[in-house]
Image (cartoon, rainbow, N blue to C red):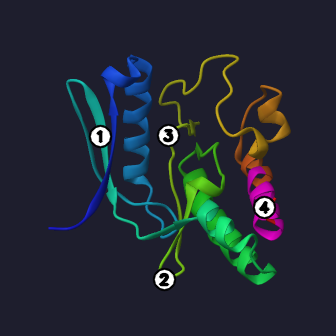
Amino acid sequence: DRRVATKVISAARGGSAEIDRRAQLEARVLCRLEHPNVVRVLDAGTTPDSVFIVMEWLEGRSLRAILTRLRYLTVSEALSVAVRIAEGVHSAHELRVIHRDLKRENVMMLRDNQVKVLDFGIAKFLSGEGPTTEKDVYLGTLRYMSPEHLLGQAVRARSEVYALGALLYTLLTGR
């Protein structure tokens, strides 16, 4: 009797065992991730033709929607948001997970000003749970990718420091 959000990845739509495997990895990792600044996963599973992840229902707006309305945040607002994003992402790093797609669209500001990092769908798992990318395949959003990510080198926690810096710049300038 609670409202939830469900992410469903259909094998028919994706048509790939790799997409199915990645979705299952995302679900397993997110079920272990418990931090107030990361969307909470309540359940996950598979059907013969899909993978599903059941998450807490969030009421709020993405940072993209907020910036569309306000253009930019004040310095204190931007720093407050960035610290909470960093705390959430750090909790993922403690589980040896690199988000790889920090951007305005993947962060929500809830009605009570709580900040939630979303969408670990292209995360890099450093815990040995199997490869998470193919060679020479770049996943992420270009404007937030670190130089080492763009050069095809290993993506680590420091890569997300770069992405967070780019996101903070966007929060402060609207560009």
Of discs 2 and 3, which sits in the foreground? 2
Q: Which mark is drawn over residue 19?
A: none
The alpha-carbon separation of the residues under discs 1 and 4 comes to: 32 Å
Judging depth in this view, the residue of 133 and 171 nearest the camera is 171
Say which label, 2 or 3, has the lower sequence index: 2
Location of mark 2 (residue): 112
Sequence-earlier tag: 2 or 4: 2
Dot 3: what SS? loop
Image: 151 above or below 121: above
Q: Estimate the spatial distance between the alpha carbons at disc 2 and disc 3, rounded to whole Å.
A: 26 Å
Residue 87 in sight: no
Q: Amino acid at mark 1?
A: Phe
Residue marked by disc 1 = 52
Q: Residue at x 59, y 54 (%)?
A: 105
Residue marked by disc 3: 121
Q: Is residue 114 left or right of residue 79?
A: left
Q: Quadrant of the N terminus?
A: bottom left
Q: How far, Cα to Cα, is label 4 from label 3?
A: 23 Å
Q: Earlier in the sequence, mark 1 or mark 4?
A: 1
- Which quarter of the picture shows residue 91? bottom right
The magenta segment: 163-173
